[in-house]
Every structure is written in structure tokens, then in C-alpha cells.
Image (cartoon, grey):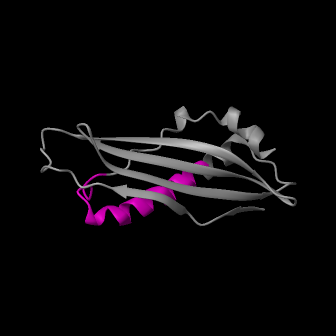
Amino acid sequence: MIEQTPLVVTEWHYHPPAAKLDEAEKISSFVTLDIMKKRAATKKGIACRFTCSFVYGEETILEYVAEDSYVIDFADVIDKIELLTMIRNSYSKVKEKFDFSKIDTVLRNTSLMALNEAAIDADAILPLVK
């Protein structure tokens, strides 16, 4: 059995821009994914940490970090398709939380970038869930 844990936002550092945003300049956003192995006496698992940054010129507007994890029975075998589904589901939760939290910020019309699954090296991650 695979069990997904609740999403935990570990950082939300919002810094309103000093000046009014100029439409000519774009807000740049970056998303990184870190995968960590989790292990207990009776279960195995992984934790997905997404770090999202929004930058306007030289100024960081928001640093947002959220973590999600999966608890997996030792008997369960995870393949690439299942692993990517797990990561996709975690990112969906991160995006949903961001979309709700951004409402009171200058980022209310900004979205998180789409998850680039081609950049995820599933072969390097799979040994973490064996």
C-alpha cells in the first residue's frame, strides 16, 4: 500500500516589491525538486521537496518551500510510471496550495510553472524506494 502524507509548507517568505511592478518586466520563477529517501522499521518511502522562487529584477518576491511524502509497504514495488505519478501528484498539491496562498500577494495573477517531467531522472530516484 502507498500512502501520501499531508503537504507541509515549510517556508513562505513573501517580500512585497519596493516599487510598483512594471508590466514591461516579467517576474521570473524557478522550481526545484529534491527527493529524499525515508525508511522506518516497517515501511519505506520518499519525500518530495519543491522549492519555488519568484524574482522581479534583482528582488526576490517569494520563497516558497513545500514537502510531501509517501509511505510505502516494503512488499510494494514502484516502477517509473508510479514514481512519476507520485511526483506529479505532489506537485499538484504544491500548486494548489500556492494558488490559494498567492491571493493576497502581487503574484495573484502568476502561476507556478508546469512540472517538467523530462527533467526528472526517474532512474536515479527509483533505488530510493527499493
Q: Quadrant of residue 6?
A: bottom right
Q: Position of residue 80 (x, y in %)?
A: 69, 40
Seen at 23% across and 37% down, the residue is 57
Pick whichever, 74 or 39, lies toward us: 39
As drawn, is 78 to the left or to the right of 66? Answer: right
As drawn, is 62 to the left or to the right of 34? Answer: left
Pick whichever, 60 or 46, lies toward us: 60
Point out the stretch of residues depicted in magenta: 87-110
Q: Position of residue 18 (x, y in %)?
A: 17, 50
Q: Quadrant of residue 12?
A: bottom left
Q: Quadrant of residue 34?
A: top right
Q: Quadrant of the image for the N terminus? A: bottom right
Q: Quadrant of the image for the C terminus? A: top right
Seen at 21% across and 40% down, the residue is 26
Seen at 12% across and 51% down, the residue is 20
Q: Is residue 116 positioned above or below 62 on the image?
A: above
Seen at 76% across and 47% down, the residue is 78
Pick whichever, 13 or 77, lies toward us: 13
- Numbered disc total: 0
Task: Reply yes or no: does residue 104 show up in magenta.
Answer: yes
Q: Position of residue 117 (x, y in %)?
A: 53, 38
Magenta region, mostly helix, strand or loop?
A: helix
Q: Position of residue 110 (x, y in %)?
A: 28, 52
Task: Reply yes or no: does residue 45 show up in magenta.
Answer: no
